[in-house]
Image: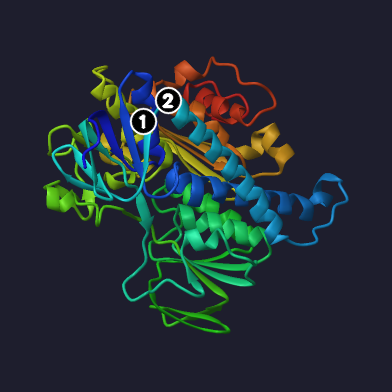
Amino acid sequence: MTDAEADLVILGGGSGGYAAAFRAAELGLSVTLIEKDKLGGTCLHRGCIPTKALLHAAEVADSAREGDQFGVKSVFEGIDIDGVHKYKDTVVNRLYKGLQGLAKAHEINYVEGTGTFVGGTTVEVDGTRYTGKNVLLATGSYSKTLPDLELGGRIVASEEALTLDRVPEKVVVLGGGVIGVEFASVWASFGAEVTIVEALPRLVPNEDEFASKQLERAFRRRKISYKTGVKFTGAKQDDNGVSVSLESGETLEADLLLVAVGRGPNTAGHGYDEAGITMERGFVRTDERLRTNLPNVYAVGDIVPGLQLAHRGFQQGVFVAEEIAGLNPGPVDESGIPRVTYSHPEVASVGLTEAEARETYGSDITTFTYDLGGNGKSQILKTSGAVKLVKAPDGPVVGLHLVGDRVGELIGEAQLIYNWEAFPEDVAPLIHAHPTQSEALGEAHLALAGKPLHVHG
C-alpha cells in the first residue's frame, strides 16, 4: 500500500524532525511525520527536559539545606522521590500536549510506527509506503555503553536514572561529560555520595580548560569526588551493590553505576546502509546544506556528525524545511551553537576554546577572565565562577565561556556576540541592567576594549 505523495516525509519526531515538520507546514508544504514512540523524542521525554526538572528540584533541595546562609530558617527533611517524579512528569506532559496540539494545528500527517528508509524518497511503516518529493532522516541517538558492560539491574543509563524509585546512597558515574556531571550534581544535592570516573584528563573535556578547572573546584567544595585520567576496566553486581574496577587497580563500591559515556547515532535497522546512504562510524554523512549523497534526502540532528544537542537538531530541521521551500537559508555554523551543562554550577559556552583559537589564529590571540566575585548579583546568589573571553588578533570575540549558577541564561547574549562577529568595542557601550549577572559579560568586554572599570587591567 502506498500513501499519497507529500512534499516532505520525515523519519523521526524529535527536535529536528518536528521542527522541520512545523516550519515546512508554515511554508505551505505537505508533511508526513513518522515517529515510533512519542512526538518530541528523547529530549522531551528522556533527556533535556526531565533532567533539567531534576536539576531544579536539586537546586530547591540545596536552598532548603542552606537557608541559614541567607538568614532563613529552613530544614531539609529529605527527598520525596515520588513527588519529584510527579513534578518532572507534569512538566513533560504539559509540553507534550502542546506539541501534539501544534502538530494538529499544522495539519501534519502524523504516523505512529517504526519506519524503514527503503530508497529513493520512500519510507515504509508496517507495510505502508510513504513517498515524498523529499525525505528527512532524523532518527536521533541512544545511550552508549562500553564493550562487555551490560546495562541492567544496578548498572543503568540516563533513561533508567530518570525513573529511579529511590535516591541511591553511593553512586559511581562513568563519564565526566555533560550527562555525567549533571546527574552527579543532582544526586549530590539529593544526599548521595558520588564519584565520577573520566578517562580523559578533566571533567567536561570538550569545554575550555578554564571551565573544567572551575567546575572541578566547585565539585570539590561540594564533596563530589572525581577521578580523571583513569580508565574503567569492569563492573560486577549482586543484590547488595556494584563493584567498579579501574585500570589503576582501585575498586569502587556503590549502590548504582550510571553509564554516561556518550550517545550513539540511532541509524541501525532503519535501512540507511541498504539504501546506499553514505555512513561513517554509524553517522550519516551530509554536506553543509545537510544533503546526503542521495538526491532529495536530507539528515539532521544526532545522526549527523557534530554536537548532539536538541537545539542544534531543531535549527537544522528549520534549515532543511526552508531549503526545500526554496528560501536558500544560510548554513548552520557549528561553532555558533551555544552549549550548556546544567550542573551546580552551570557551564555555558559558545565559539572556540582558547586551544582551538590558538590552533586557528596562532599565539597572538587575546583572552580575558572576569571573576564573578566582582559581580553583585552573583554575590547575592552566593555563586562563584567567571567569564572568559577569547579574541582573535585584531578581530572579533571568537569564544565566550562562563561558569557559575544560572549562567546558562546568559548564553543568549553570548551567542549573539559570537555569531554577529562583534568586537569588544561593539559590546562595551551596551548597557547591562544592574544588578544582573549579565554585567559580567559587559565588564569583560569593557576590559578587552581597554576600559576596565571594576578590574585592574
Whether residue 312 appears in this view of the structure is: no
Q: Is residue 213 above or below residue 334?
A: below
Tag 2: Cα neighbours inside 10 Å, few (<14), some, or many (≥20)?
Answer: some
The x, y position of residue 99, in whole percent, is 49, 35
Badge 1 element:
helix
Tell me if 146 is positioned left or right of 345 in this view. Answer: left
Q: Which mark is residue 6?
A: none
Q: Between marks 2 and 1, how big is the CA–CA gap?
A: 9 Å
| Residue reaching furthest to the front | 1
Whether residue 411 appears in this view of the structure is: yes
Residue at x-position 68% and y-position 64%: 191
Residue at x-position 33% and y-position 24%: 24
Q: Which mark is residue 106?
A: 2
Which residue in the protein does label 1 denote? 21
**Disc 2, disc 1: CB below 8 Å?**
yes
Q: Nearer the viewer, residue 143 or 174?
A: 143
Badge 2 element:
loop
- Tally of numbered discs: 2
